[in-house]
Image (cartoon, rainbow, N blue to C red):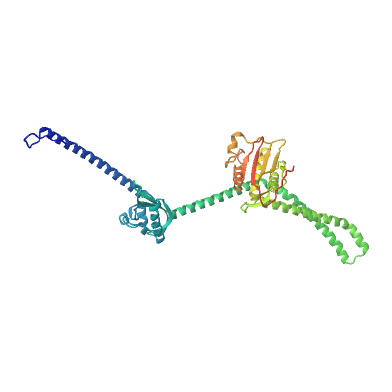
């Protein structure tokens, strides 16, 4: 600043006063601008504190901000509610005092580690709540200033009790879903069995009638032999016995007796085989996976569909005569039944219906293909063919669950169920081979 003084005069000149006033104005303006800047920064600081306060008041997890020594500077409302302590009573206290001894030790070690590595620590610790120790999942993160120096830490804790309860509810829901899926499989199998009842009744009626007829024959033979042996015991003469044998036709009855016994035995064995097939067919599929013959299982499934369809169509088998896979026979049987039933429905109105099952192997997988010479699957339906409740059958003739459940069962067995290109219907079931049994190496027709 420059001041001009007149010669011999101790007073300022007009120019000097002008410079002084200008300097004062500039200084005042600078002070005003600085004051405005301070007020803006103060407002920003207040806004930031309000934001932090709203965060600390709204978070559901417990939260605490501590300094380098672990002394609390800020706490969330949730931490105050959990410990039932006023925030003012918590601020300035040691963070470790909020935990049981084991948790306090973990907090101290984590703070020490933060000073060295700045890496966040994750651990479980029990917080001393008003109702006693409660488990929390703790995350302790470093707070640093602009120069990278550690100035404290931020603790966030999530209640494990609620998390474990959520996991428990999720597990229960998953279990209910599995039970519902199992029930769907059973319902679909019952629907299939309902379609087979007429065929089953016919299959059982034939051998039972055979056994019944042979039982009546045996009863007649026994009566005649009893008559003859009564006369023998009464001491009848030889001539009378010879005549009686001729009259009762014992020689012929004796030959027929063995045939009747054999016929009754064969009928009983047939009934036994039918019941055994039914038991295999109606198994709920909850048994552990086991090795079994895919071809034999497919033959049983196809045979039962043929019995129930009454269409006169016989499934033609080609490919391998046997192939051992690992899985649940009842569930695989259900897949084959669904595929064969759909094929039978597709060729129901054809003059020359054909349904075929081809069994082959590809590396470590068994491939079962069910084909028919029906119209096939329309292009607009191919993408939705395995969707639940999707069906092209008339109302009341299909649940829309057969292919969906079969697809799910195949995946659970580590395999797949896919739709082939046609020209008719073609579905390919791929399942893992069993490594416990030797496998055939060539195909037979």
Q: Nearer the viewer, residue 13 or 430?
A: 13
Quarter of the image with the C terminus in it: top right
Left or right relative to 414: residue 4: left
On the image, the x and y values in percent for residue 213 come to 78, 53
Q: Which quadrant: the N terminus? A: top left
Q: Residue lying farthest front?
A: 7
Quarter occupied by residue 253 = bottom right
Q: Nearer the viewer, residue 112 or 80?
A: 112
Q: Give residue 349's quadrant in the image.
A: top right
Q: Would residue 340 be visible to someone looking at this image? A: no
Residue 325 visible to an observer of this rendering: yes
Within the image, what quadrant is residue 374 found in?
top right
Q: What count of labels does the image hold? A: 0
Residue 290: x and y in percent read 65, 52
Q: Residue furthest left?
A: 8
Position of 80 relative to 38 (above/below): below
């Amino acid at each position: 600043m420059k001041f001009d003084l007149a010669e011999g005069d101790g007073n300022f000149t007009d120019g000097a006063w002008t410079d002084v006033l200008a300097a004062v104005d500039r200084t005042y303006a600078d002070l005003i601008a600085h004051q405005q800047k301070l007020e803006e920064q103060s407002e920003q600081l207040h806004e930031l504190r309000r934001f932090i306060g709203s965060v600390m008041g709204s978070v559901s997890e417990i939260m605490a901000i501590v300094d380098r020594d672990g002394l609390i500077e800020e706490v969330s409302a949730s931490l105050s509610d959990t410990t039932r302590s006023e925030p003012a009573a918590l601020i300035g206290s040691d963070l470790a005092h909020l935990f049981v001894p084991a948790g306090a030790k973990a907090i101290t070690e984590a703070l020490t580690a933060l000073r060295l590595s700045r890496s966040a620590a994750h651990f479980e610790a029990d917080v001393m709540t008003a109702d006693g120790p409660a488990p929390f999942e703790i995350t302790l993160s470093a707070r640093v200033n602009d120069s990278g120096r550690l100035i404290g830490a931020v603790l966030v804790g999530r209640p494990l009790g609620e998390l474990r309860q959520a996991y428990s509810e999720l597990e229960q829901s998953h279990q209910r879903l599995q039970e519902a899926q199992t029930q769907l499989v059973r319902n679909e199998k019952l629907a299939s069995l309902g379609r087979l009842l007429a065929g089953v009744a016919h299959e059982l009626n034939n051998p039972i009638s055979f056994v019944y007829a042979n039982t009546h024959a045996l009863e007649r033979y026994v009566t005649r032999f009893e008559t003859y042996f009564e006369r023998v015991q009464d001491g009848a003469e030889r001539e009378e016995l010879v005549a009686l044998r001729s009259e009762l036709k014992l020689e012929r009855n004796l030959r027929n007796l063995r045939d009747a016994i054999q016929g009754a035995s064969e009928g009983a064995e047939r009934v036994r085989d039918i019941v055994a097939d039914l038991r295999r067919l109606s198994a709920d599929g909850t048994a552990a996976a086991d090795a079994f013959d895919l071809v034999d299982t497919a033959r049983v499934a196809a045979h039962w569909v043929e019995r129930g369809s009454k269409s006169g169509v016989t499934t033609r088998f080609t490919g391998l005569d046997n192939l051992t896979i690992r899985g649940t026979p009842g569930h695989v049987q259900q897949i084959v039944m669904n595929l064969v039933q759909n094929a039978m429905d597709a060729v129901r109105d054809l003059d020359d219906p054909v349904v075929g099952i081809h069994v082959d192997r590809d590396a470590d997988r068994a491939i079962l293909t069910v084909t028919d010479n029906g119209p096939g699957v329309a292009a607009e339906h191919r993408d939705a063919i395995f969707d639940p409740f999707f069906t092209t059958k008339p109302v009341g003739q299909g649940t829309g669950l057969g292919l969906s459940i079969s697809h799910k069962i195949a995946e659970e067995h580590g395999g797949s169920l896919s739709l082939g290109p046609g020209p008719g219907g073609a579905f390919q079931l791929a399942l893992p081979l069993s490594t416990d049994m030797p496998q055939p190496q060539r195909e037979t027709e």
